[in-house]
Image (spheres, rainbow, N blue to C red):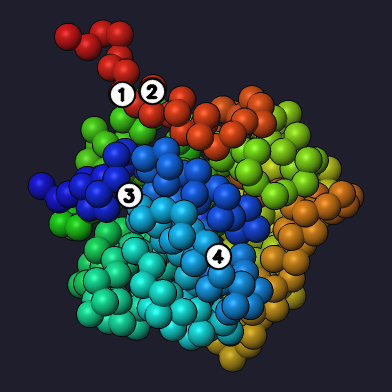
Amino acid sequence: MSQTLDQLLGINYPVIVAPMFLISNTKMIKAALESGVTAAFPALNYRTDAELRAAIADIKAASSKPFGVNLIVNKSNPKYPGQLKTLLDTKVDFIITSLGNPKEVIDACKPKGIKVFCDVVDLAYAKKVESLGADAVIAVNNRAGGHAGNISPKELVTLLKANISIPIISAGGIGTGQQLREVLEWGAAGASIGTIFIACEEADISPDYKKAMIEYGEKDIVRTTKLSGSALTVINTPYVQQLGTKANFLEWILNNNKTLKKYAKMILALRGMKAVEKAAMGATYKTVWCAGPAIEYVKAVRPLKEIIGQLVKEYLTPPANSP
């Protein structure tokens, strides 16, 4: 049997507080590490290399527990080469790769003992990254917030479990400790959990975003291709309804034209990131707030430690019908 996430990283509980664009910060990472789980943040949350290095140093000064950084590894991220060098220099514990071929990252990390977990949405890509030497896969299912997959949580975990031998970390839809225990029963090594932490006290997002996390529910979550060119899971605010959730004809052409695809992806991604940033950080009528169906479990703004504490307590409490 492959290792569980807590065994793999030497932590107390098999949970990653997921890297969330604009939301994850050093306060959240440190609180997660103090609570017995691990956490990661997107490298893109820091505009300069100096800021990225300072964030890593801040976390390392506060804790010796393992944490990671999410790295966008495709050509739409012009900062990728520099960010990879920084993560290698600072020897973060693990890197989560997204949206591209992780071969260069895996090859560079192996000699330094840095683990590489790769986002996957299907079996074909999971097999590919396993063959490249990935240490685990992040199985992004159709209940994930942000960029979601297309396969249900149970179907994806069981499919991967039957066909690959490296650990599987389920990502998407988990809002309770019982659900965490369930994905482990399916064969997952652990879970990457994000949405239930968006409204934590430590998150430096606008009060409106946190209020929306409480007031909206699972029925209000929709997918849109209007922002990054890829399906993005967001709260169905009046502005999202006005914008529509399907890419227009020009966006579709640009996104599927072989010659222009690279540049179109870059333009769409930058434009989408700007829209999400404006909504997350300040009051605006253009409210584009990322979240997944686990928004249903967000009922108040709470300290991150308290949210993890409840999750762990539920996870360790056996079902009522257990022997």
Q: Which residue is mark 4?
A: 55
Identify the amino acid type marked 3: Ile
Q: Which residue is mark 1?
A: 316
For discs 1 and 3, the disc positioned in front in the rendered view: 1
* Label 4 CA crowd tier, 10 Å (few <14, some 14–19, many 20+): some
Q: Which residue is mark 3?
A: 169
For discs 2 and 3, the disc positioned in front in the rendered view: 2
Q: What percent of the width, then of the height, locates residue 140? A: 42, 52
For discs 3 and 4, the disc positioned in front in the rendered view: 4
Residue depicted at 70% across the width and 50% down the height: 204
Q: Which residue is mark 2?
A: 313
Identify the amino acid type marked 1: Leu
Q: What percent of the width, then of the height, locates residue 116? A: 32, 67
Identify the amino acid type marked 4: Ala
Q: Residue furthest left?
A: 1
The answer to whether the residues at label 1 and label 2 have Cβ atoms under 8 Å apart is yes
Q: Is residue 133 above or below residue 148?
A: below
* Label 2 CA crowd tier, 10 Å (few <14, some 14–19, many 20+): few
User: Would residue 216 be visible to someone looking at this image?
Assistant: yes
Q: What percent of the width, then of the height, locates residue 138? A: 36, 55
User: From mark 3 to mark 4, how far is it between C-alphas?
Assistant: 25 Å
Report the quarter where the C terminus lies.
top left
Marks 1 and 4, the one that precedes in the sequence: 4
